Image (spheres, grey):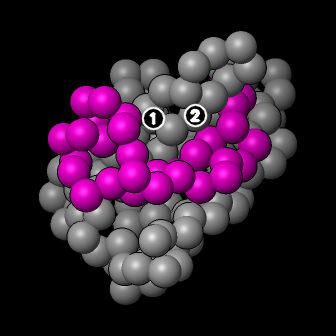
Amino acid sequence: QVQLVESGGGLVQAGGSLRLSCAASGRTLSSFAMGWFRRAPGTERDIVTAISWSSGSAYYADSVKGRFTISRDNAKNTVYLQMNSLKPEDTAVYYCAADPSYQSTVVSGSMRYWGQGTQVTVSS
């Protein structure tokens, strides 16, 4: 089992930045692809970004390209999401998730483990 705990969410003005962290326990994350997903009110949960276990591959949704950066520190068992130039439409609950398959993470979002989510609110 892997337990994932997100932190770093909060309220920020448009144009500001936040850095989310996802700390894992139970197992090492080094063999898992990691993803960040988000769910805005009244919408489905969508993938934001994903990273392979080696950090050799990364995927970004078009809406966040150039603004968000995913990274991971396998030694610390932690994944990060740096969010810059935030917009009100980025407001959502952000979830961290882990899965053995990077392809599955990007294509289907069918993840084996999920965090509980952290709220990000961007005011205009």
Residue type at the position of mark 2: Arg
Q: Position of residue 113 (x, y in %)?
A: 46, 55
Q: Which residues are magenta?
A: 90-119
At numbered mark 1, what does the secondary structure look like: helix, strand or loop? strand
Considering only order in the chain, which callout, 1 or 2, is on the residue closer to the N terminus? 2
Residue type at the position of mark 1: Val
In the rendered image, which quarter is residue 63 located in?
top left
Residue 24 visible in rendering: yes
Dot 1 crowding, Cα within 10 Å, few <14, some 14–19, many 20+: many
Q: Which residue is mark 2?
A: 38
Give the distance between the C-alpha atoms of the residues marked 2 and 1, in whole angstroms.
7 Å
| Label 2 with label 1: CB-CB less than 8 Å | yes
Residue 85 visible in rendering: no
For residue 95: magenta? yes
Taking depth in this image into account, of 78 and 44 the one nearest to the observer is 44
* Residue drawn 49% across the image and 27% down it: 46
Dot 2 crowding, Cα within 10 Å, few <14, some 14–19, many 20+: many
In the rendered image, which quarter is residue 38 located in?
top right
Which quarter of the rendering shows the C terminus? top right
Give me the disc on residue 48.
1
Vertical relation: 108 (above or below) 6: above
Q: Position of residue 35 (x, y in %)?
A: 40, 48
